[in-house]
Amino acid sequence: MRRRRRPGVVAALVLLASVASATVIVPMRDETLVAGSDLIVTGAVASVEAVLLAGPRVVTRVTVRVERTLSGEVAGPTIVVTEPGGAVAGLEVTVPSAPAFAPGERVLLFLRSRPDGSLATTALGLGKFALATASDGSARARRAAPLPTDRALDELLDRIARTPRGRAAVATDGRAGAAIEPPRVRSGAAPFSLVKSRGGNVARWFEADCGLPITIHRAGAAGGDDVTSDAAVTAGAAAWTDAPASIALAPGDVVRPVRSVIDGAVDGRNEVVFDDPFREVTDLTDCQGILAETRFVASGDARFPELGRRVNGRRFGKLFEADVVVNPGIGACTRDPLALSEVVGHELGHVIGLGHSSEKLNETNPAKREALMYFAIHADGRGARLAPDDVAGVAFIYPEALVPRDPIGKVACEVGLGLLSTSCFGEQLAAAPFHHYRRAVAAARKATRTTAADRQQAQLGRALAALDAADRAAAARVAGACGADMRTRLQSYRDRVAQALATFTASRRNAGARLAVSGPGS
């Protein structure tokens, strides 16, 4: 029997297609890359959008906030880079050597102007470097593909400065041609996902905005193997720390296992617990089931402004604690020596706020299927290795551009991290400490908005006085563990502000000494 179509219902046919291309790359010397570029800039990626144009033609439009112009001239504070390929409306066009971008990522770009006035990277992926900070604090310029590169940023910038420039070009922002052609369909949605609470809220570690690491302790060992367990935590933490994002995970101490957040226990300490000593995760059956589980404690209570931040257009609550519990049956279920590292790396992705890239067993999108955050273990020797989808997700949640570059900005950032700890929830809290604390935050932020040393010093002095008042109020009005934790946090903020003030005193003392040495009779 033929089914009749109801009137008023329009059936839409979605064509799922995939187009790929191959590219042969010849390495380029720095001098050749500079000479072939009309514009060289550093900046932060503001947005990434795949667009289906007439034809059909798929391009990806990348908006970049320019921080520094090294060659050429820009016509405004932002530029648009238009790259070939992308995925939109069921059509996926892949150019293997084209660079990938993620919102929040800081980049060094070598750009050429097309005949239509749009901007593109010079020689596809060879013209894009991701900027990152290494574990020793040095600035690096990295390129994953098509030719993996990890270089000292200062050395690369120095070579650019000493290299003759390319052909002269008029000032441009790339907003022409394909960059402004009206789209038939557009999609700026990122394929990665965020972990959501039952209420639909998402959360992140605010400490990352100040350049502070999140410490992850190890509890117990998988099958009693300390070496393999240490390696798994170290590799998992390093994978996310080395991404072009502000988050840094630091392996901490080996601690005695205790019940985790999964079992409702909250102690303010982040742990990876091996071998599930308290049976908090369901046992594997025929090597099927849950390999590991992560739970975290977070709050976005609107009564406390310090518990909410808007990043890349999304409001996040504040993470306070996260625990990972690893099932003891992993070792017997795989021959992959790096399987444990992959599992821990995946769970640490949840710890920083990422959800699964996909939960489809037959996922056809390779970007989602190959991600570390794919819901099923790959167990193919890759270990804790990030894929582009993972990188896009962590860069979205933790953009490097948020981290202050100057010492006063870092002090103000740390002072703004708040007074609350997990011990404070459910307690009656006096308003007085928060009143003084917010005055301190306001004064510290004012210090960042001026370059005059005397004004910075004055505002930091006001911040320190307000923190002292907040500490006295906490001592008098907030009892128990919450009061103790609050005073510990306040003492940390007071120390940071006092250190900053001491630098002003030292610099003035040194200036006086120089004046005495160079004065009359010298």
Image (tube, rainbow, N blue to C red):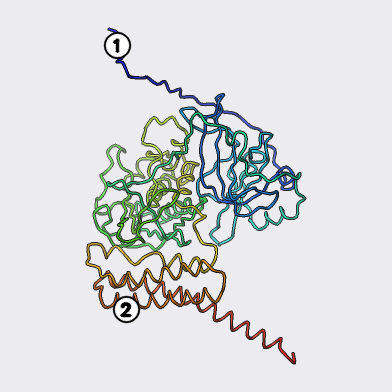
**Residue drawn at 57 percent across, 24 percent down:** 55
Residue 232: % across, % down: 43, 51
Q: Position of residue 512 (x, y in %)?
A: 63, 85
Callout 2 crowding tier (Cα within 10 Å): few <14, some 14–19, many ≥20: some
Q: Which mark is residue 335?
A: none
Q: Is residue 446 left or right of residue 507?
A: left
Residue drawn 41% across and 61% down? Answer: 215
Query: Image check: 437 left or right of 338?
Result: left
Amino acid type, residue under disc 1 in the picture: Arg
For marks 1 and 2, the one nearer the N-term is 1
Query: Observer-nearest residue: 275 or 98?
Result: 98
* Viewer-side residue, 439 vs 410: 439
Mark 1 secondary-structure assignment = loop
How many labels, in total? 2
Q: Residue furthest top?
A: 1
State which quarter of the image contains the C terminus. Answer: bottom right
Res. 472 mark: 2
Check if mark 1's residue and mark 2's residue have beta carbons within 8 Å. no
Q: Residue at x 29, y 52 (%)?
A: 276
Type of amino acid at the residue the image marks with label 2: Arg
Quadrant assignment for the N terminus: top left
SS of the residue at dot 2? helix
Q: Is residue 34 above or below residue 93?
A: below
Of residues 307 and 7, which is closer to you in this image? 7
The answer to whether residue 65 is above or below residue 375 is below
Q: Quadrant of residue 319?
A: bottom left
Image point 48% across, 68% down: which residue?
446
Q: Residue furthest bottom?
A: 521
Crowd tier of the residue under label 1, counting other residues whose Cα lies within 10 Å: few below 14, some 14–19, many 20 or above: few
The residue that disc 1 covers is 4
Cα–Cα span, label 1 and label 2: 77 Å
The picture places residue 158, in percent across and down from the top left corner, at 70, 57
